[in-house]
C-alpha cells in the first residue's frame, strides 16, 4: 500500500518526523508532498521547496528506512476543487492519504480517496510557527528539529535569512 502525506514543512520538525515514522509502520511506500512549493523567503515560508526536500531526505537518511519514499514539491493552485487532480498528476498513484488538515481531508474524501488522521507528537512544542518565532528571537530552536535539519539550516544561513526578512518588513 502506498500513502500520501502533505505538509509545508517550514521547517521539517520532530513532530512531522514522528508522524512519518508512524505512517511507515502502516504502509509499504510513502509519498511526502511538500505543499506551497512556490513559496519561500517569507516569514510564514522561509525555506524553498528544494531546501525542504533536502531537510526531509537528510533527516530520513538517518533513520535508515528501507521502504520507498518519494519527496515531491507541489505548488498551490487557485482552485481547491481541482487540487486533488493536480496532486494526482504530480505524484505516483496512492491508496490512502494521511492528514489532519480539514481542507485536505475534505477534498480527498470528495474525490473518493481513503483519508486517515495523524497525531502530531507533542503538538505544544513542535509547531512550525513557534519554531520560526524561536529562530527570530534567538531562542533554542535546534532541539525541535532533527539534527540533519539543523545542518541544512546552518548551511543555507537560514536564521539570518529569516532575521533579514523581518528587518525588511519593519
Ligand atoms: P499547513 O497550512 O502547512 O498547516 C496547517 C497547520 O496544521 C499548521 O499549524 C501545521 O503545523 C499543522 N499540521 C501539519 N501537519 C499536521 C499533522 N499531521 N497533525 C496536526 N497538525 C498538523 O497545512 P498542511 O496540512 O501542513 O499542508 C497542506 C498543504 O496543501 C499546504 O501547502 C496547502 O497550501 C496545500 N493545499 C493547497 C491547495 C490548493 O492549492 N488549492 C488546497 C489544499 C491544500 P506545522 O506548521 O507545525 O507543520
Image (cartoon, rainbow, N blue to C red):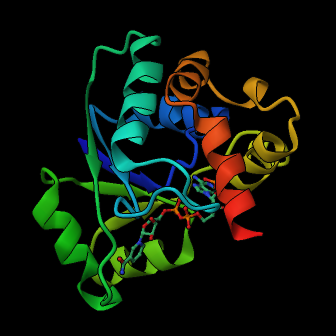
Q: Pick whichever, 70 or 35, lies toward us.
A: 35
The image shows residue 72 at horizontal and vertical percentages of 26, 47
Q: Is residue 127 left or right of residue 81?
A: right
Q: Pick whichever, 23 or 41, lies toward us.
A: 41
Looking at the image, residue 110 lies above or below residue 52 = below
Instruction: Locate the N terminus and report the quarter of the image it occupies.
Output: top left
Q: Residue at x 55, y 39 (%)?
A: 12
Q: Is residue 113 left or right of residue 22?
A: left
Q: Residue at x 23, y 54 (%)?
A: 95
Q: Pick whichever, 115 or 85, lies toward us.
A: 85
The image shows residue 109 at horizontal and vertical percentages of 36, 77
Q: Pick whichever, 135 or 120, lies toward us.
A: 135
- The quadrant holding residue 79 is bottom left
The image shows residue 122 at horizontal and vertical percentages of 79, 40
Q: Residue at x 52, y 33 (%)?
A: 22
Looking at the image, residue 85 lies above or below residue 16 = below
Q: Residue at x 46, y 11 (%)?
A: 62
Instruction: Locate the C terminus and report the quarter of the image it occupies.
Output: bottom right
The image shows residue 142 at horizontal and vertical percentages of 74, 25
Looking at the image, residue 102 lies above or below residue 47 = below
- The quadrant holding residue 23 is top left
Q: Is residue 159 left or right of residue 59?
A: right
Amino acid at each position: 500500500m502506498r500513502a500520501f502525506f502533505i505538509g509545508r514543512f517550514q521547517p521539517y520538525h520532530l513532530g512531522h518526523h514522528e508522524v512519518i515514522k508512524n505512517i511507515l509502520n502502516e504502509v509499504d511506500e510513502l509519498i511526502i508532498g511538500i505543499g506551497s512549493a512556490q513559496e519561500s523567503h517569507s516569514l510564514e515560508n522561509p525555506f524553498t521547496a528544494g531546501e525542504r526536500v533536502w531537510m526531509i531526505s537528510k533527516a530520513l537518511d538517518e533513520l535508515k528506512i528501507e521502504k520507498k519514499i518519494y519527496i515531491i514539491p507541489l505548488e498551490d493552485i487557485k482552485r481547491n476543487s481541482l487540487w486533488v487532480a493536480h496532486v494526482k498528476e504530480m505524484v505516483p498513484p496512492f491508496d490512502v492519504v494521511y492528514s489532519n488538515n480539514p481542507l485536505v481531508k475534505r477534498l480527498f474524501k470528495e474525490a473518493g480517496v481513503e483519508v486517515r488522521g495523524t497525531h502530531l507528537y507533542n503538538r505544544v512544542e513542535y509547531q512550525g510557527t513557534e519554531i520560526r518565532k524561536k529562530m527570530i528571537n534567538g531562542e533554542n530552536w535546534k532541539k525541535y528539529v532533527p539534527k540533519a535539519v539543523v545542518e541544512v539550516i546552518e548551511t543555507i544561513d537560514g536564521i539570518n535569512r529569516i532575521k533579514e526578512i523581518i528587518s525588511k518588513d519593519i
